[in-house]
Image (spheres, rainbow, N blue to C red):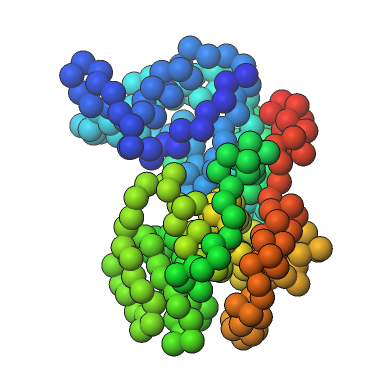
Amino acid sequence: MLLIECGPTNTRFSFKENNVEMPFIRRTFLALKDYEGDVVYYQHDIALPFPFGECLREVKESYVMGLSKINLTRMTWELGREKLFFGNKRWIILHNTLNEEFFIKYCSTKRYKYEHFIREGLMKTRYITQLLVSHCDIEEMGMEPNSNPKYDLMYVGKEKDKFRTQLILQYYDSPKIRSCIIGKWKSKPWRYIEYLGVRGKQGETIRFYNSALATVFVPTEYMKKGGILTSRITQALLGGCVVFIHRDIYGIEKLVDPRIQNVCIVTPSEFEDKLEVLKSVDLETRKFIVELERKYLLKRYCDFDWNRLLHW
């Protein structure tokens, strides 16, 4: 079995080939070219589908060779598109979207075509939550709730769509709340949120959350429709930050354990009252809430049947 995690748009890492700087996905393609057997692609974001549809595109060689050497169409063409992706290969797409039908349709535009290859019997999709944590993660990275947090609410994440922005304003933008945002935002339509800009690296997110009492997970439009909860929730809980989750997300009753739904699921109309209650409790009670959410919201790697998930 070959396991792939590198997304097709990954430009963070690169290497030189014939003195040309190539994206890391090129190295993934080179590994695929000579491999035969089952392949698992861990698609940790619905917006990162693998470009299987390149096999079906009708393009002329003259057009392809006029493209940049780092263009996906040219890279897959030069490596033999059909053999590259499906020469004695079957694919399992491991993804984090609860709404399977939405996931497949989202990933079935001309460059990706998941629906087509599923019908052809060359691909299967399987769901796994993104809220994964190990016992070592909690022991080595987990932090106690801050006894005197600087902020009531912290949001870590970049600007995405109007739906998320609207929810940010509804939950975070209030004169009664000490709130802040870390991340890249061009528009800043709020009045009361302290904007901290882009700070640190991904690995520092846990530490950032420790300076806040709580966070509200607000989805984008596609996260809402797909039933997607992201690892930001894991990072916040490891940072000792209480997590609230916006209610209007597909399958929320399945995504959140019934034992903590009353604790963490919220709507804008009821949120301020819940936050005031949280602000009124002592440190020991906050520790208990965080431990409760870690226990029932996060999933352990050992909870899953990996033999079933990773094999055809």
Q: Please identify the quarter of the rendering in which residue 301 is found.
A: top right
Q: Residue at x 75, y 67 (%)?
A: 261
Q: Please identify the quarter of the rendering in which residue 161 is found.
A: bottom left
Residue 73 in view: no
Q: Is residue 78 above or below residue 277?
A: above
Residue most extreme to the left:
19
The quarter of the picture where the C terminus appears is top right
Residue most extreme to the right:
259
Q: Along the horizontal axis of the image, is 206 left or right of 283?
A: left
Residue 188, given in percent of the width and then of the height, sits at 32, 75
How many numbered discs, if any?
Answer: 0
Residue 120, given in percent of the width and then of the height, sits at 65, 33
Q: Residue at x 60, y 29 (%)?
A: 40
Q: Residue at x 48, y 81 (%)?
A: 177
Q: Is residue 88 above or below residue 206?
A: above
The quarter of the picture where the N terminus appears is top right
Q: Along the horizontal axis of the image, is 254 left or right of 136?
A: right
For the residue pair 39 and 54, the one nearer the viewer reads as 39
Residue 9 in view: yes
Residue 140, given in percent of the width and then of the height, sits at 58, 39
Q: Residue at x 28, y 23 (%)?
A: 15
Residue 25, given in percent of the width and then of the height, sits at 39, 29
